[in-house]
Amino acid sequence: MSRFGAFRASAPSRPLLLALGLPALLAVLQQQVLLRQPPQLEALRNAAASSGPAALQARFSRPMQAASLQRGSSLEPPLSHRWLGNGSALLLSLEEGQRVEAPLWLELGGHDQRGLRLPASRWIWDPRPRVVAVVDVAGGEQLQLRDHDGGWRPISPVWPEIPQLLPLGDGSGVVAASRQSDGQLRLWRIRLAQHNLRPAEQPARPVRAEAPEPLQAEPVVFAHLSSNRNGDLLIQSGQLEPGSSVARLQRAGGWRWRRLPWSASGPMQLLPEGGAVLVPDTEGLHLEALPPRPPQRQTLPGSRDLSSFCPQAGRALLQRHWPDFRRSLELVEPGQPPRQLWLGGQALVASACSRSGDRVWALLMEGTERPLLTLLALNRQGQELGRRRLEGWELEPGTGLHWDASGERLLATLRPQAPGDAPPLPARAVLIDGASLELKPLAGAVNQAQWLVAG
């Protein structure tokens, strides 16, 4: 056979070349077709907002121009907002200082980084939290949820007593402790399906509550509950026996519990932004990194207690106890020593703050027979912005102040003072305007009330 014939015999055949080249050609054509397709909105969900009234997390199929989203999107009512981030995941954040008083209509539009237009879509978004409360009913107590129209509806069975209530920080449910006839506590989680964001063409749906699920096999004598904006849950619980106290952590969406190694002299608190827990002991307050992060401890010495967290990461209000029995309220920020905002002889029974502590509210109590409440509004330098004496009201013990950035208001559980030796009057959930400090009691009696964030 000639050399030329041998070459022809060894050369690849035309069908083989076609078989090898056709998939590559199809891949190139497919890539070109995809590049010419408009970007798509793949997901839109509520996001935890630490610097404003509310936020939405958007994920697109292509990297987007944030400036074009700013121009092409609108809100009705027309609230100030901005798009943050870059690439295909961006955050729509409402500017601080605005009040959301009704559901928002969102028109979403813009261009990707290649200049292709995003198909327009319309959404109804209601970032307002709801009030969840413990309510007296026939046969005991019950958890009830207040809808935005003012109506209350049950989300739990009737238990003899519900001494503790904790809404999960991501709005996915509530955790409660019910007291048995022998005084011990059962811990329950009630999962909630909220529908606060939907395409405009879909009808509204109410919050749906699932049946309670037990969180521990056995009852406990005491328990403390804490959650963060991720929806993680920390439970400190134990029996009467010394050394029986255990702290366990469950991540949001998981089922496994992780036992935490620290012992504490009081309630542990998860940081709102996640990743760490505040642990009090006789030496002071310790900030401990949570697994799987490497162990790391930061310590603030002195006789201090956590009063409340601020929405922005790393900020909190602490109550300091002085040897002469005075108390002070301090603002702590990353890398800064505590800043004293208030000092006095009254009891500091509750506090709250907006954003990074730009505005702070302190609820003070003096007297014992008929205690007098005073609500102070302060700025981050400790200058007084407002003061109101809450005459005729008492704070339900242990219920605190709770801030709602979307409505610029506080929530408190207050009990009207009964005249003379008359029986105690039922407590009320009371809304307090963050600027004027005006009180608005809600209809219906409650034993405690907190915000359930819009999840």
Image (cartoon, rainbow, N blue to C red):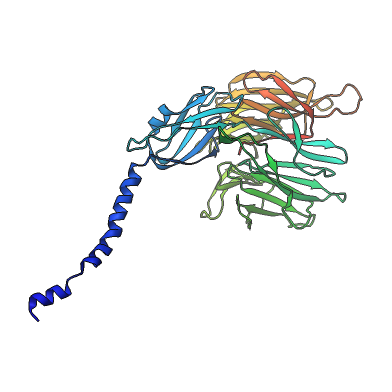
Of 291 and 9, nearer the camera is 9
Above or below, comparing residue 89 to residue 416 in the picture: below
Q: Is residue 37 left or right of residue 91?
A: left
Q: Is residue 219 left or right of residue 55?
A: right
* Residue 266 visible, this orientation: no
Q: Is residue 60 left or right of residue 234?
A: left
Q: Where is residue 196? Give x, y as percent.
A: 60, 35
Q: Quadrant of residue 405?
A: top right
Query: How many numbered marks, from 0 up?
Result: 0
Q: Quadrant of residue 310?
A: top right
Q: Where is residue 134? Give x, y as percent.
A: 77, 37
Of 276 and 132, nearer the camera is 132
Of 108 and 45, nearer the camera is 108
Q: Residue at x 79, y 34 (%)?
A: 447
Quarter of the image containing the C terminus? top right
Above or below, comparing residue 59 to residue 445 in the picture: below
Q: Where is residue 388? Give x, y as percent.
A: 69, 19
Of 348 and 235, nearer the camera is 235
Q: Residue furthest right?
A: 421
* Residue 403 visible, this orientation: yes
Q: Residue at x 82, y 44 (%)?
A: 159
Q: Residue at x 73, y 41 (%)?
A: 165
Q: Where is residue 89? Give x, y as percent.
A: 44, 41
Q: Residue at x 66, y 45 (%)?
A: 226
Quarter of the image containing the N terminus? bottom left
Q: Quadrant of residue 146?
A: top right
